[in-house]
Image: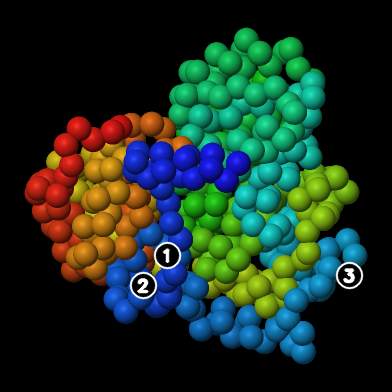
Amino acid sequence: MEQRIRTRLAGRERDGLLRKLIPVDQEKHGRMRAGDKEFINFSSNDYLGLSSHPDIIKAARKAAGPVFGSSASRLMTGSTGLHDALEQKTAGFKGKPAALVFNSGYQANVGVISALCGRGDVIFSDRLNHASIVDGILLSGAKSFRYRHNDIAHLEELLSGERRKYRNSMIITETIFSMDGDIAPVREIVSLKKRFDSLLMADEAHATGIFGETGAGILEQAGITDDCDIAMGTFSKALGSFGAYIASSGAIKEYLVNTCRAFIYSTALPASVINASIAAIDAVKKEPFRRTALLANAAHLRGRLREKGLDVKGESQIVPVILGKNPETARAGEKLREKGYWVTPVRPPTVPKGTARLRISVTCDHTRDVLEKFADDLCDILEDRAWDTRNLRS
């Protein structure tokens, strides 16, 4: 087994797919340190800069109290008044009757999907949905069909041909796709959900805090909050804290408390994290200038890169530059680090084969001067291919 593992690792390194953990120190205002060098951070999900917000840090410290850990699952002795307060605040923020807190977005998706769906049911999932959604579907045992990315006609075709064969149906989509940065056609999906008697689950991990009148997400922006049965999101990205949630009806919440293994058998998040998330929702509501600046920054950078002829996707704070080949993308990331930018290359299997990319995460803390210089430096790197290898593997 050991030798097989070593052989597989060597193959991944040869194909430009080997990943390594690099210790870093996070800093304020879109910067970080690795070793003794400072970088402008274009790989963080701290889109609104809230991880260093004084009110959130103060809330975490205040709730720490005489002990730190919760020491038990929610159904044992780990559920506190703060957990209940966060769930009530989250439900109000998302415009739903109830909410349930999870320890991570991955855990929420895997747990909720596998609890609500099973054999005899069917799931229709966007082809580019997050790995946690894919794993939740596999764990559920339900029959599943993947529709082409954001392709409403293909989803309708699958629903027309397959929905009637199964007991219960669920449609699952991200609202902002984490690797492409584009927005799902949620109004059209709602129409199909109603027509074909399906539940709708929307992953708002990268939309929470950024889109909508109050920052609640794409569902709020599209005016379809009431039509989405389960809204999942995280506190760990734009909200700058940790953990995740689902917002739903009271009945769905109660059912999950009783059946969702990912929730039942996990130690509760500590009070300091929970109180930080409460403060984060308040900050999003009180400081809309952060999401306004963020989206303006992203639009500016995307426009500049497209002007320079790069293959850029998305319509959100996530700005992917598609390069295609794995070693080329990895080397471009290395060259950017030499210039003081931290941009993580994303390669298969995280993205489809042949679509390796630089996934640029813009934040509200990036200044226009920084964005302009980054665009120039990135284009200089990509135009000067002297560093590039020959016969690159795709």
Name the residue beneath numbered marker 2: 34
Which quadrant of the rendered structure holds the N terminus? Answer: top right
Examine the rendered structure and indicate whether residue 54 appears above or below residue 344.
Answer: below
Answer with left or right where residue 339 lies relative to residue 106. Answer: left
The tag earlier along the polypeptide, 2 or 3, is: 2
Amino acid at the residue labelled 3 = Thr
Q: Quadrant of residue 167?
A: top right
Q: In screen coordinates, is 25 left or right of 383?
A: right
Relative to residue 75, is residue 208 drawn left or right?
Answer: left
Give yes or no for contact between labels 1 and 2 (Cβ–Cβ under 8 Å).
Answer: yes
Query: Element at badge 3?
Result: helix
Q: CA distance from mark 2 to mark 3?
A: 39 Å
Whole-Å distance between the Cαs marked 1 and 2?
8 Å
For image coordinates 29% across by 76% down, the residue present is 37
Crowd band around label 1 with a 10 angstrom C-alpha radius: few (<14), some (14–19), many (20+): few
Residue at the image point whose x is 71% and y is 39% from the top: 113
| Viewer-nearest of discs 1 and 3 | 1
